[in-house]
Image (cartoon, grey):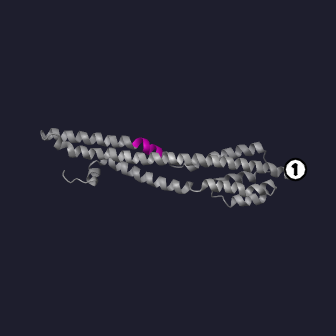
Amino acid sequence: MEGLSVLDMIQQGWIATYPLLAFSVATVTIILERAWSLRGIIPRTLQLAEAIRSPLESGDFQSALQTVQAQAATPAGRIFADVIARHASDSLEYLSDLTEDKRFEEIEALKGPLWVLGTVSSSAPFIGLFGTVVGIIKAFHNMAVMGSGGFSVVAAGISEALVATALGLGVAIVALVFYNFFQTQIERIEAALTIACNRVLDAIHLGRKVHGV
């Protein structure tokens, strides 16, 4: 056992370490994907609401619609496009309900695979603990088979088993930190969308007055 590397320990404790390595790959992938997807949404949302505010207040709904349609790749662009397109046929109360429904859909889409991070953060420590328990059982079984040797016989086996716990805790900590970070980011995005939608609805109301609606 002398000179046993961490890689060897991971290979020998495969029953727990291999799933944890798969979890770590999935965790890093989701972190990078969500960081890219959520970047800049808050400032773009507020900027778009401000850009269409004047045209809406002056009753130039067509110009405002063209502006938001050009931003159809953003949550705010999709929400505003649906609302402005229906401004003439529906009441403000209905438009308010519509923005709420669309905002809920967009927020749920932004959450995407975050549930995976939550699952990893809660299950990885237990998988690591399971691997450790299995490794310790094997180590004491080897000592029983050999019949002597004391702790020196099982020391290497126990150190191998503890690698699973360390790996499980490491994966879980990273997953939990970024899960909470992204949840906070999405809450801030939801707040920004709520503020922006209210501004747009107010501007539509003023624009209707210009046309005597």
The residue stretch that appears in magenta: 117-123
Q: Overall secondary structure of the magenta stretch?
A: helix
> How many discs appear?
1
Where is residue 147 shown, x and y percent of the image?
12, 38
Identified by mark 1, the residue type is Gly
Instruction: Name the secondary structure under disc 1.
Output: loop
5 sits left or right of 183 in the view: left
The residue lying at 55 percent from left, 55 percent from top is: 37
The residue lying at 52 percent from left, 55 percent from top is: 35
Can residue 102 be seen in the rendering of this structure?
Answer: no
Where is residue 110 shown, x and y percent of the image?
57, 50
177 sits left or right of 64 in the view: left
Which quarter of the picture shows residue 154?
Answer: top left
Can residue 47 be seen in the rendering of this structure?
Answer: yes
Which residue is identified by label 1? 212
Where is residue 20 shown, x and y percent of the image?
37, 48
Where is residue 25 shown, x and y percent of the image?
41, 54
In this rendering, the answer to whether 41 lies above or below 141 is: below
| Residue furthest out toward the right | 212
The residue lying at 29 percent from left, 39 percent from top is: 133
106 sits left or right of 152 in the view: right
Residue density around tag 1, few if under 14, some if 14–19, many if 20 or more, within 10 Å: few
The residue lying at 18 percent from left, 52 percent from top is: 2
